[in-house]
Image (cartoon, helix red, strand yellow):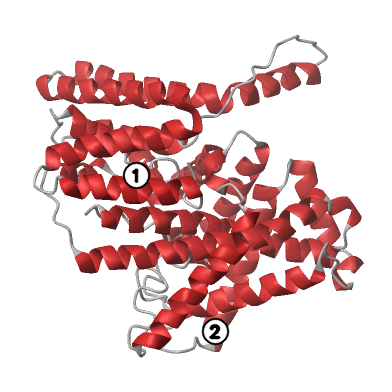
Amino acid sequence: MFFNSLDFAIFLPIVFTIYWLFKNHFKIQNLIVVIASYVFYGWWDWRFLSLILFSSLVDYFVGLSLSKQETKFKRKVLLWTSIVVNLGFLGFFKYYNFFLDNFVDAFSFFGYSIKTNSLNIILPVGISFYTFQTLSYTIDVYKRKLEPTKNFIAFSAFVSFFPQLVAGPIERATHLLPQFYKKRVFDYGLAVNGLRQILWGLFKKVVIADNCAEHANFIFNHSPDLSGSTLLIGAIFFTFQIYCDFSGYSDIAIGTSRLFGFDLMKNFAFPYFSRDIAEFWRRWHISLSTWFRDYLYIPLGGSRGGTWSKVKNTFIIFIVSGFWHGANWTFIAWGTLNAIYFLPLLLRKKNRRYLEVVAYDKTLPSFREILNIGITFSLTVFAWIFFRAENINHAFDIIKSIFSNSLFSIPHFSNSDIALTTVFLTFVFILIEWSGRNQAFAIETFGLRWKKISRLLFYYLLIFSIFYFTGKEQEFIYFQF
Protein backbone atom coordinates (compact mmCIF):
# COMPACT_ATOMS: atom_id res chain seq x y z
CA MET A 1 0.00 0.00 0.00
CA PHE A 2 1.50 3.32 -1.06
CA PHE A 3 1.11 6.57 0.88
CA ASN A 4 0.15 8.33 -2.35
CA SER A 5 -2.60 5.85 -3.27
CA LEU A 6 -6.38 5.86 -2.98
CA ASP A 7 -6.10 2.70 -0.87
CA PHE A 8 -4.15 4.54 1.81
CA ALA A 9 -6.49 7.55 1.63
CA ILE A 10 -9.30 5.17 2.64
CA PHE A 11 -7.22 3.04 5.01
CA LEU A 12 -5.86 5.88 7.18
CA PRO A 13 -9.18 7.50 8.27
CA ILE A 14 -10.65 4.08 9.09
CA VAL A 15 -7.69 3.07 11.28
CA PHE A 16 -7.56 6.55 12.84
CA THR A 17 -11.25 6.40 13.81
CA ILE A 18 -11.11 2.87 15.26
CA TYR A 19 -7.86 3.65 17.09
CA TRP A 20 -9.22 6.70 18.92
CA LEU A 21 -12.51 4.98 19.78
CA PHE A 22 -10.38 3.12 22.35
CA LYS A 23 -8.58 6.24 23.64
CA ASN A 24 -8.76 4.96 27.23
CA HIS A 25 -7.38 1.51 26.40
CA PHE A 26 -3.84 1.83 25.07
CA LYS A 27 -3.33 -1.95 25.04
CA ILE A 28 -6.25 -2.33 22.65
CA GLN A 29 -4.81 0.55 20.61
CA ASN A 30 -1.53 -1.39 20.40
CA LEU A 31 -3.40 -4.41 19.05
CA ILE A 32 -5.15 -2.18 16.51
CA VAL A 33 -1.74 -0.87 15.41
CA VAL A 34 -0.45 -4.42 14.92
CA ILE A 35 -3.51 -5.49 12.90
CA ALA A 36 -3.44 -2.30 10.81
CA SER A 37 0.29 -2.69 10.20
CA TYR A 38 -0.06 -6.29 9.03
CA VAL A 39 -2.93 -5.29 6.73
CA PHE A 40 -0.85 -2.37 5.42
CA TYR A 41 2.15 -4.61 4.68
CA GLY A 42 0.09 -7.59 3.50
CA TRP A 43 -1.61 -5.35 0.94
CA TRP A 44 1.65 -5.59 -1.02
CA ASP A 45 2.24 -9.34 -0.54
CA TRP A 46 0.69 -11.22 2.39
CA ARG A 47 3.20 -14.08 2.08
CA PHE A 48 5.99 -11.98 3.57
CA LEU A 49 4.05 -11.25 6.74
CA SER A 50 5.56 -14.46 8.08
CA LEU A 51 9.02 -12.87 7.89
CA ILE A 52 7.99 -9.94 10.08
CA LEU A 53 6.25 -12.26 12.52
CA PHE A 54 9.20 -14.66 12.70
CA SER A 55 11.69 -11.81 13.16
CA SER A 56 9.49 -10.37 15.92
CA LEU A 57 9.27 -13.73 17.68
CA VAL A 58 13.03 -14.36 17.51
CA ASP A 59 14.01 -10.97 18.92
CA TYR A 60 11.24 -11.00 21.52
CA PHE A 61 12.38 -14.34 22.97
CA VAL A 62 16.06 -13.44 22.63
CA GLY A 63 15.35 -10.29 24.65
CA LEU A 64 13.55 -12.28 27.36
CA SER A 65 16.38 -14.83 27.48
CA LEU A 66 18.99 -12.08 27.80
CA SER A 67 17.18 -10.74 30.87
CA LYS A 68 17.54 -14.13 32.56
CA GLN A 69 21.10 -14.81 31.52
CA GLU A 70 24.21 -13.40 33.21
CA THR A 71 26.87 -15.64 31.64
CA LYS A 72 28.86 -13.56 29.16
CA PHE A 73 29.32 -16.42 26.68
CA LYS A 74 25.63 -17.38 26.66
CA ARG A 75 24.60 -13.74 26.29
CA LYS A 76 26.83 -13.47 23.22
CA VAL A 77 25.32 -16.64 21.79
CA LEU A 78 21.85 -15.13 22.17
CA LEU A 79 22.96 -11.87 20.58
CA TRP A 80 24.53 -13.65 17.62
CA THR A 81 21.42 -15.79 17.23
CA SER A 82 19.43 -12.62 16.61
CA ILE A 83 22.11 -11.16 14.31
CA VAL A 84 22.49 -14.33 12.24
CA VAL A 85 18.74 -14.89 11.87
CA ASN A 86 17.96 -11.30 10.90
CA LEU A 87 20.95 -10.71 8.66
CA GLY A 88 20.55 -14.23 7.27
CA PHE A 89 17.09 -13.40 5.95
CA LEU A 90 18.31 -10.04 4.68
CA GLY A 91 21.32 -11.63 3.02
CA PHE A 92 19.32 -14.35 1.31
CA PHE A 93 16.58 -12.17 -0.12
CA LYS A 94 18.76 -9.22 -1.01
CA TYR A 95 22.24 -10.52 -1.79
CA TYR A 96 22.03 -14.22 -2.74
CA ASN A 97 22.09 -13.70 -6.52
CA PHE A 98 24.68 -10.91 -6.22
CA PHE A 99 27.19 -13.12 -4.42
CA LEU A 100 26.39 -16.09 -6.65
CA ASP A 101 26.94 -14.10 -9.86
CA ASN A 102 30.18 -12.57 -8.59
CA PHE A 103 31.40 -15.98 -7.42
CA VAL A 104 30.86 -17.34 -10.94
CA ASP A 105 32.51 -14.30 -12.51
CA ALA A 106 35.56 -14.67 -10.26
CA PHE A 107 36.11 -18.29 -11.35
CA SER A 108 35.49 -17.37 -14.99
CA PHE A 109 38.25 -14.77 -14.72
CA PHE A 110 40.71 -17.57 -13.92
CA GLY A 111 39.43 -19.75 -16.77
CA TYR A 112 37.08 -21.98 -14.83
CA SER A 113 33.46 -22.42 -15.87
CA ILE A 114 30.86 -23.01 -13.16
CA LYS A 115 27.21 -23.69 -13.87
CA THR A 116 24.81 -22.36 -11.29
CA ASN A 117 21.16 -21.44 -11.19
CA SER A 118 20.11 -18.01 -10.00
CA LEU A 119 16.92 -17.91 -7.98
CA ASN A 120 13.96 -15.74 -8.90
CA ILE A 121 13.85 -14.06 -5.50
CA ILE A 122 11.31 -11.35 -4.70
CA LEU A 123 12.81 -8.76 -2.36
CA PRO A 124 10.40 -8.15 0.54
CA VAL A 125 9.57 -4.45 0.76
CA GLY A 126 11.24 -2.73 3.69
CA ILE A 127 13.26 -5.75 4.87
CA SER A 128 16.41 -3.63 5.32
CA PHE A 129 14.47 -1.21 7.52
CA TYR A 130 12.62 -3.50 9.91
CA THR A 131 15.64 -5.83 10.15
CA PHE A 132 17.79 -3.00 11.49
CA GLN A 133 14.97 -1.85 13.76
CA THR A 134 14.63 -5.23 15.45
CA LEU A 135 18.41 -5.57 15.70
CA SER A 136 18.59 -2.27 17.57
CA TYR A 137 16.33 -3.79 20.22
CA THR A 138 18.41 -6.93 20.71
CA ILE A 139 21.72 -5.04 20.75
CA ASP A 140 20.46 -2.45 23.24
CA VAL A 141 19.06 -5.18 25.52
CA TYR A 142 22.39 -7.02 25.27
CA LYS A 143 24.26 -3.82 26.21
CA ARG A 144 21.79 -3.32 29.09
CA LYS A 145 20.66 0.02 27.67
CA LEU A 146 17.08 -1.21 27.55
CA GLU A 147 14.95 -3.49 29.68
CA PRO A 148 13.46 -6.31 27.56
CA THR A 149 9.71 -6.15 27.13
CA LYS A 150 7.36 -8.89 28.26
CA ASN A 151 4.53 -7.46 26.20
CA PHE A 152 4.58 -9.18 22.80
CA ILE A 153 1.79 -7.01 21.36
CA ALA A 154 3.68 -3.82 22.20
CA PHE A 155 6.86 -5.29 20.75
CA SER A 156 5.07 -6.40 17.58
CA ALA A 157 3.61 -2.90 17.24
CA PHE A 158 7.13 -1.46 17.54
CA VAL A 159 8.51 -3.78 14.85
CA SER A 160 5.64 -3.42 12.39
CA PHE A 161 4.44 0.16 13.03
CA PHE A 162 2.90 0.86 9.62
CA PRO A 163 3.81 4.55 9.09
CA GLN A 164 7.53 3.76 9.07
CA LEU A 165 7.54 0.02 8.39
CA VAL A 166 8.76 -0.09 4.80
CA ALA A 167 11.01 2.96 4.43
CA GLY A 168 11.79 4.30 7.87
CA PRO A 169 12.81 6.26 9.76
CA ILE A 170 14.65 3.32 11.33
CA GLU A 171 13.55 3.79 14.93
CA ARG A 172 15.54 2.81 18.00
CA ALA A 173 13.80 0.60 20.50
CA THR A 174 14.91 2.98 23.26
CA HIS A 175 12.86 5.76 21.62
CA LEU A 176 9.77 4.17 20.05
CA LEU A 177 9.08 1.05 22.13
CA PRO A 178 8.41 2.89 25.45
CA GLN A 179 5.72 4.93 23.65
CA PHE A 180 3.65 1.74 23.38
CA TYR A 181 3.72 1.25 27.16
CA LYS A 182 1.70 4.33 28.03
CA LYS A 183 -1.62 5.97 27.30
CA ARG A 184 -1.75 8.29 24.29
CA VAL A 185 -3.84 11.43 24.46
CA PHE A 186 -5.20 12.99 21.29
CA ASP A 187 -3.64 16.39 20.77
CA TYR A 188 -5.46 18.54 18.20
CA GLY A 189 -2.48 20.87 17.67
CA LEU A 190 -0.13 17.92 17.20
CA ALA A 191 -2.56 16.29 14.76
CA VAL A 192 -2.85 19.48 12.69
CA ASN A 193 0.93 19.71 12.64
CA GLY A 194 1.04 16.10 11.47
CA LEU A 195 -1.44 16.79 8.67
CA ARG A 196 0.67 19.74 7.58
CA GLN A 197 3.76 17.52 7.40
CA ILE A 198 1.82 14.85 5.48
CA LEU A 199 0.73 17.51 2.99
CA TRP A 200 4.30 18.69 2.50
CA GLY A 201 5.53 15.11 2.14
CA LEU A 202 2.94 14.38 -0.52
CA PHE A 203 3.88 17.57 -2.38
CA LYS A 204 7.55 16.57 -2.35
CA LYS A 205 6.77 13.06 -3.56
CA VAL A 206 4.00 13.63 -6.12
CA VAL A 207 4.83 17.07 -7.48
CA ILE A 208 8.63 17.26 -7.28
CA ALA A 209 10.00 13.70 -7.10
CA ASP A 210 7.64 12.09 -9.62
CA ASN A 211 8.09 14.90 -12.14
CA CYS A 212 11.87 14.79 -11.76
CA ALA A 213 11.71 11.00 -12.11
CA GLU A 214 10.03 11.27 -15.50
CA HIS A 215 12.99 13.22 -16.92
CA ALA A 216 15.71 11.44 -14.95
CA ASN A 217 14.46 8.02 -16.10
CA PHE A 218 14.31 9.10 -19.74
CA ILE A 219 17.80 10.61 -19.63
CA PHE A 220 19.50 7.72 -17.82
CA ASN A 221 17.72 5.14 -19.97
CA HIS A 222 18.80 6.89 -23.20
CA SER A 223 22.18 8.15 -22.05
CA PRO A 224 24.21 6.93 -25.08
CA ASP A 225 22.13 9.14 -27.38
CA LEU A 226 22.22 12.32 -25.28
CA SER A 227 24.64 15.18 -24.85
CA GLY A 228 26.74 15.91 -21.78
CA SER A 229 24.57 18.92 -20.92
CA THR A 230 21.42 16.78 -20.95
CA LEU A 231 23.08 14.07 -18.86
CA LEU A 232 24.22 16.64 -16.29
CA ILE A 233 20.68 17.99 -15.98
CA GLY A 234 19.44 14.39 -15.73
CA ALA A 235 21.78 13.83 -12.78
CA ILE A 236 20.44 16.98 -11.13
CA PHE A 237 16.87 15.84 -11.73
CA PHE A 238 17.71 12.53 -10.03
CA THR A 239 19.36 14.41 -7.16
CA PHE A 240 16.08 16.15 -6.37
CA GLN A 241 14.04 13.05 -7.17
CA ILE A 242 15.74 10.87 -4.58
CA TYR A 243 15.68 13.58 -1.92
CA CYS A 244 12.03 14.53 -2.38
CA ASP A 245 10.99 10.89 -2.80
CA PHE A 246 12.69 9.63 0.35
CA SER A 247 12.30 12.68 2.59
CA GLY A 248 8.71 12.95 1.37
CA TYR A 249 8.08 9.41 2.61
CA SER A 250 9.66 10.28 5.96
CA ASP A 251 7.50 13.40 6.26
CA ILE A 252 4.34 11.39 5.62
CA ALA A 253 5.46 8.71 8.08
CA ILE A 254 6.29 11.21 10.82
CA GLY A 255 3.10 13.20 10.22
CA THR A 256 0.94 10.06 10.23
CA SER A 257 2.54 8.93 13.49
CA ARG A 258 1.57 12.22 15.11
CA LEU A 259 -2.08 11.51 14.27
CA PHE A 260 -1.82 8.45 16.51
CA GLY A 261 0.09 10.19 19.30
CA PHE A 262 3.58 8.90 18.44
CA ASP A 263 6.83 10.74 17.93
CA LEU A 264 9.30 9.51 15.29
CA MET A 265 12.83 10.75 14.87
CA LYS A 266 13.69 13.34 12.23
CA ASN A 267 15.18 11.64 9.18
CA PHE A 268 16.21 14.58 6.96
CA ALA A 269 17.39 18.07 7.87
CA PHE A 270 17.65 19.96 4.56
CA PRO A 271 20.84 18.15 3.43
CA TYR A 272 21.28 20.04 0.15
CA PHE A 273 22.03 23.21 2.12
CA SER A 274 25.09 21.54 3.65
CA ARG A 275 28.46 23.29 3.53
CA ASP A 276 30.58 20.14 3.43
CA ILE A 277 30.09 16.39 3.08
CA ALA A 278 30.29 15.77 6.82
CA GLU A 279 27.37 18.13 7.37
CA PHE A 280 25.52 16.46 4.50
CA TRP A 281 25.78 13.08 6.21
CA ARG A 282 24.53 14.52 9.48
CA ARG A 283 21.45 15.72 7.61
CA TRP A 284 20.80 12.86 5.13
CA HIS A 285 18.94 9.67 6.17
CA ILE A 286 19.76 10.47 9.79
CA SER A 287 18.21 7.28 11.18
CA LEU A 288 20.49 5.06 9.07
CA SER A 289 23.69 7.08 9.43
CA THR A 290 23.31 7.24 13.23
CA TRP A 291 22.48 3.50 13.30
CA PHE A 292 25.74 2.68 11.55
CA ARG A 293 27.59 5.15 13.76
CA ASP A 294 26.32 3.63 17.01
CA TYR A 295 26.23 -0.07 16.11
CA LEU A 296 29.18 -0.36 13.72
CA TYR A 297 31.49 2.66 13.60
CA ILE A 298 31.90 3.21 17.34
CA PRO A 299 32.30 -0.54 18.16
CA LEU A 300 35.04 -0.65 15.49
CA GLY A 301 36.86 2.11 17.38
CA GLY A 302 35.39 5.12 15.64
CA SER A 303 37.87 7.94 15.27
CA ARG A 304 39.68 7.22 18.52
CA GLY A 305 42.60 5.29 17.05
CA GLY A 306 45.49 6.26 14.82
CA THR A 307 45.35 7.46 11.23
CA TRP A 308 45.12 3.98 9.73
CA SER A 309 42.28 3.05 12.09
CA LYS A 310 40.36 6.21 11.15
CA VAL A 311 40.83 5.54 7.44
CA LYS A 312 39.80 1.89 7.77
CA ASN A 313 36.71 2.59 9.87
CA THR A 314 35.59 5.41 7.59
CA PHE A 315 35.79 3.22 4.49
CA ILE A 316 34.04 0.34 6.27
CA ILE A 317 31.12 2.48 7.40
CA PHE A 318 30.56 4.09 4.00
CA ILE A 319 31.03 0.92 1.96
CA VAL A 320 28.65 -1.02 4.23
CA SER A 321 26.19 1.86 3.98
CA GLY A 322 26.43 1.69 0.20
CA PHE A 323 25.99 -2.08 0.18
CA TRP A 324 22.96 -1.76 2.49
CA HIS A 325 21.22 0.08 -0.35
CA GLY A 326 21.42 -2.77 -2.80
CA ALA A 327 23.22 -5.70 -4.40
CA ASN A 328 25.09 -3.78 -7.07
CA TRP A 329 28.67 -2.55 -7.39
CA THR A 330 27.27 0.90 -8.16
CA PHE A 331 26.15 1.28 -4.54
CA ILE A 332 29.55 0.19 -3.26
CA ALA A 333 31.18 2.73 -5.59
CA TRP A 334 28.79 5.40 -4.30
CA GLY A 335 29.69 4.56 -0.70
CA THR A 336 33.42 4.49 -1.47
CA LEU A 337 33.25 7.86 -3.21
CA ASN A 338 31.52 9.42 -0.19
CA ALA A 339 34.22 7.96 2.06
CA ILE A 340 36.85 9.68 -0.12
CA TYR A 341 34.90 12.93 0.20
CA PHE A 342 34.58 12.58 3.98
CA LEU A 343 38.04 11.36 4.93
CA PRO A 344 40.02 14.64 4.48
CA LEU A 345 37.57 16.43 6.80
CA LEU A 346 37.95 13.71 9.43
CA LEU A 347 41.74 13.61 9.27
CA ARG A 348 41.95 17.42 9.51
CA LYS A 349 39.39 17.37 12.37
CA LYS A 350 37.00 19.60 10.44
CA ASN A 351 34.14 17.11 10.21
CA ARG A 352 32.11 18.85 12.92
CA ARG A 353 32.63 22.49 12.08
CA TYR A 354 29.10 23.07 10.73
CA LEU A 355 26.65 22.03 13.43
CA GLU A 356 24.16 24.89 13.12
CA VAL A 357 21.80 25.57 10.25
CA VAL A 358 23.38 27.57 7.46
CA ALA A 359 22.75 31.35 7.66
CA TYR A 360 21.03 30.92 11.00
CA ASP A 361 18.70 33.88 11.69
CA LYS A 362 19.63 35.39 8.33
CA THR A 363 17.66 35.72 5.12
CA LEU A 364 20.53 34.95 2.76
CA PRO A 365 23.82 33.06 3.09
CA SER A 366 27.20 34.71 2.71
CA PHE A 367 29.23 34.35 -0.51
CA ARG A 368 31.47 31.82 1.21
CA GLU A 369 28.46 29.78 2.33
CA ILE A 370 27.01 29.86 -1.19
CA LEU A 371 30.35 28.63 -2.55
CA ASN A 372 30.58 25.83 0.03
CA ILE A 373 26.98 24.75 -0.60
CA GLY A 374 27.61 24.77 -4.36
CA ILE A 375 30.75 22.62 -4.04
CA THR A 376 29.07 20.14 -1.69
CA PHE A 377 26.00 19.92 -3.90
CA SER A 378 28.17 19.31 -6.98
CA LEU A 379 30.06 16.49 -5.25
CA THR A 380 26.74 14.98 -4.19
CA VAL A 381 25.32 15.14 -7.73
CA PHE A 382 28.45 13.43 -9.05
CA ALA A 383 28.12 10.62 -6.49
CA TRP A 384 24.41 10.13 -7.29
CA ILE A 385 25.36 9.21 -10.86
CA PHE A 386 26.84 5.95 -9.54
CA PHE A 387 23.78 5.39 -7.34
CA ARG A 388 21.38 5.75 -10.28
CA ALA A 389 23.40 4.06 -13.04
CA GLU A 390 22.60 0.49 -14.11
CA ASN A 391 26.20 -0.62 -13.59
CA ILE A 392 29.71 0.77 -13.19
CA ASN A 393 30.35 1.00 -16.93
CA HIS A 394 27.09 2.90 -17.39
CA ALA A 395 28.15 5.38 -14.70
CA PHE A 396 31.56 5.98 -16.29
CA ASP A 397 30.01 6.39 -19.74
CA ILE A 398 27.72 9.09 -18.37
CA ILE A 399 30.58 10.85 -16.60
CA LYS A 400 32.72 10.68 -19.72
CA SER A 401 29.93 12.29 -21.76
CA ILE A 402 29.37 15.00 -19.16
CA PHE A 403 33.05 15.97 -19.23
CA SER A 404 33.11 16.27 -23.00
CA ASN A 405 32.56 19.13 -25.44
CA SER A 406 28.86 18.24 -25.60
CA LEU A 407 28.53 19.67 -22.07
CA PHE A 408 28.24 23.07 -23.74
CA SER A 409 25.50 22.04 -26.18
CA ILE A 410 21.78 22.79 -25.80
CA PRO A 411 20.07 20.12 -23.63
CA HIS A 412 17.44 17.87 -25.20
CA PHE A 413 14.30 16.65 -23.43
CA SER A 414 11.47 14.38 -24.46
CA ASN A 415 9.10 17.23 -23.60
CA SER A 416 10.68 20.66 -23.11
CA ASP A 417 7.53 22.31 -21.73
CA ILE A 418 7.12 19.72 -18.99
CA ALA A 419 10.85 19.90 -18.22
CA LEU A 420 10.67 23.69 -17.78
CA THR A 421 7.60 23.29 -15.57
CA THR A 422 9.52 20.79 -13.42
CA VAL A 423 12.47 23.21 -13.15
CA PHE A 424 10.13 26.01 -12.07
CA LEU A 425 8.37 23.82 -9.47
CA THR A 426 11.73 22.65 -8.12
CA PHE A 427 12.91 26.26 -7.83
CA VAL A 428 9.77 27.18 -5.84
CA PHE A 429 10.32 24.10 -3.68
CA ILE A 430 13.92 25.16 -2.93
CA LEU A 431 12.77 28.64 -1.88
CA ILE A 432 10.19 27.18 0.53
CA GLU A 433 12.73 24.69 1.92
CA TRP A 434 15.21 27.53 2.45
CA SER A 435 12.67 29.65 4.28
CA GLY A 436 11.83 26.75 6.61
CA ARG A 437 15.32 25.33 7.14
CA ASN A 438 15.20 26.17 10.88
CA GLN A 439 12.06 24.04 11.33
CA ALA A 440 11.42 20.32 11.67
CA PHE A 441 9.96 20.44 8.14
CA ALA A 442 9.76 23.28 5.64
CA ILE A 443 6.14 24.42 6.15
CA GLU A 444 5.88 23.72 9.88
CA THR A 445 5.39 27.43 10.56
CA PHE A 446 5.26 28.65 6.96
CA GLY A 447 2.40 31.12 6.50
CA LEU A 448 1.14 30.88 10.09
CA ARG A 449 1.47 34.66 10.45
CA TRP A 450 -0.43 35.29 7.23
CA LYS A 451 -4.11 36.12 7.11
CA LYS A 452 -6.22 32.99 7.27
CA ILE A 453 -7.41 33.28 3.68
CA SER A 454 -3.82 33.58 2.40
CA ARG A 455 -2.72 30.58 4.44
CA LEU A 456 -5.65 28.48 3.22
CA LEU A 457 -4.93 29.53 -0.36
CA PHE A 458 -1.37 28.25 0.01
CA TYR A 459 -2.58 24.88 1.35
CA TYR A 460 -5.18 24.57 -1.41
CA LEU A 461 -2.50 25.30 -4.02
CA LEU A 462 -0.43 22.43 -2.59
CA ILE A 463 -3.46 20.14 -2.59
CA PHE A 464 -4.43 21.14 -6.14
CA SER A 465 -0.89 20.52 -7.43
CA ILE A 466 -0.83 17.09 -5.75
CA PHE A 467 -4.09 16.05 -7.40
CA TYR A 468 -3.01 17.56 -10.71
CA PHE A 469 0.17 15.47 -10.88
CA THR A 470 -1.16 12.33 -9.16
CA GLY A 471 -1.40 10.35 -12.41
CA LYS A 472 2.39 9.92 -12.72
CA GLU A 473 2.56 7.63 -9.63
CA GLN A 474 6.17 6.51 -9.33
CA GLU A 475 6.94 3.89 -6.69
CA PHE A 476 8.94 5.16 -3.71
CA ILE A 477 12.63 4.65 -4.52
CA TYR A 478 13.56 3.23 -1.14
CA PHE A 479 10.98 0.45 -1.37
CA GLN A 480 13.62 -1.47 -3.33
CA PHE A 481 16.05 -1.28 -0.41
Question: Residue 181 lies in what quarter of the image?
Answer: top left
Q: Which x, y percent locates residue 323? A: 55, 38
Closest to the observer, 276 or 313: 276
Give the amino acid type for the residue marked by disc 1 in the picture.
Ile
Is 66 located above or below residue 239 in the figure? above
Residue 113, visible in the rendered structure: yes
Question: Residue 142 lies in what quarter of the image?
Answer: top left
- Residue ID at (23%, 25%): 60
Is 310 located above or below residue 468 in the figure? above
Q: Earlier in the sequence, mark 2 or mark 1?
A: 1
Question: Residue 196 lies in what quarter of the image?
Answer: bottom left
Q: Is residue 42 left or right of residue 468?
A: left
- Residue ID at (74%, 60%): 215
Element under label 2? helix
- Residue ID at (12%, 25%): 67
Mark 2 Cα-neighbour bin, 10 Å: few <14, some 14–19, many ≥20: few
Disc 1: which residue? 298
Element under label 1? helix
In 3D space, how far apart are the residues under numbered discs 2 and 1 (Cα atoms)? 33 Å
Q: Is residue 317 left or right of residue 178?
A: right
Q: Which x, y percent locates residue 198? A: 40, 61
Q: Is residue 178 left or right of residue 249?
A: left
Disc 2: which residue? 368
Q: Is residue 282 left or right of residue 423?
A: left
Is 348 located above or below residue 320 in the figure? below
